[in-house]
Amino acid sequence: MPQLADVIDLKSILDTASGNDLVWNRFLTELTRQLDCDSSVLLVTDQVKRKNTHFLFSVNIPPEYQEKYENELNRLDSFNYFLSKNSKTVHYSQTLVDTACTKTDASFKPLAGQKYQFGLSIPCNNNHSLNLILSRELAFSDAEQQQFSKILQSLPAMESEREGW
């Protein structure tokens, strides 16, 4: 018999998230759990001044790492920057072999070996985007990539949330 936690609808959570930090945290926690990832983050990415990129919400990312990211690592995170320039499409770090995304600065260190990432970017305006990124230590299979892309692209309510930031 499936447990209630296994059937939580991500769209329903997101529909009630507007302006509510607790619901956004619940959404990210449930998304991370359902997609079998280690961590997730919702970032506001400054496309002009990468150093101004900052966390809105996160799951399983310690405050120390968030601080280091906002003070230094955000300038080196080529995957996040790639997402912001290629919006409304789900991208996977492991499939971007011949792009600028793979030319990550050697000093960029993902959290606890979570080098496999995927995410989606929604433009807010000409200078900023809202980036959702999920990470884990294990590579994503082709089947997972198809399933996860379908799930993320089925969350249109996320785009309306950008109005609040």
Image (cartoon, grey):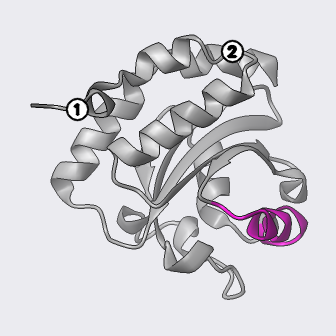
Most foreground residue, 133 or 126: 133
**Three-letter amino acid code at disc 1?**
Gln
Q: Is residue 70 left or right of residue 146?
A: right
What label sits on residue 3 in the rendered view?
1
Question: How far is mark 1 from mark 2, CA to CA?
Answer: 27 Å
For the N terminus, the image quarter is top left
Q: Provide residue 147's location: percent of width, then percent of height.
A: 24, 40
Question: Which residue shows up at 65% across the image and 80% down it?
Answer: 109
For the C terminus, the image quarter is top right
Q: Which residue is mark 2?
A: 18
When the figure is inspected, residue 18 is found, relative to residue 125, above or below; the finding is: above
Q: Is residue 45 left or right of residue 70?
A: left
Question: Which residue shows up at 50% across the image and 47% down it?
Answer: 119
Residue range in magenta is: 61-73
Name the quadrant containing residue 63. Answer: bottom right
Name the quadrant containing residue 7. Answer: top left
Which residue extends farthest left? Answer: 1
Q: Provide residue 39's location: percent of width, then percent of height.
A: 53, 57
Question: Residue 160, can we see it?
Answer: yes
Residue 125 on the magenta span: no
Question: Residue 85, can we see it?
Answer: no
Q: Provide residue 57's location: percent of width, then percent of height.
A: 70, 42
Q: Nearer the viewer, mark 1 or mark 2?
A: 1
Q: What predominant SS class does the magenta segment belong to? A: helix
Q: Provide residue 123's location: percent of width, then percent of height.
A: 68, 29
Q: Earlier in the sequence, mark 1 or mark 2?
A: 1
Name the quadrant containing residue 73. Answer: bottom right
**Three-letter amino acid code at disc 2?**
Ser
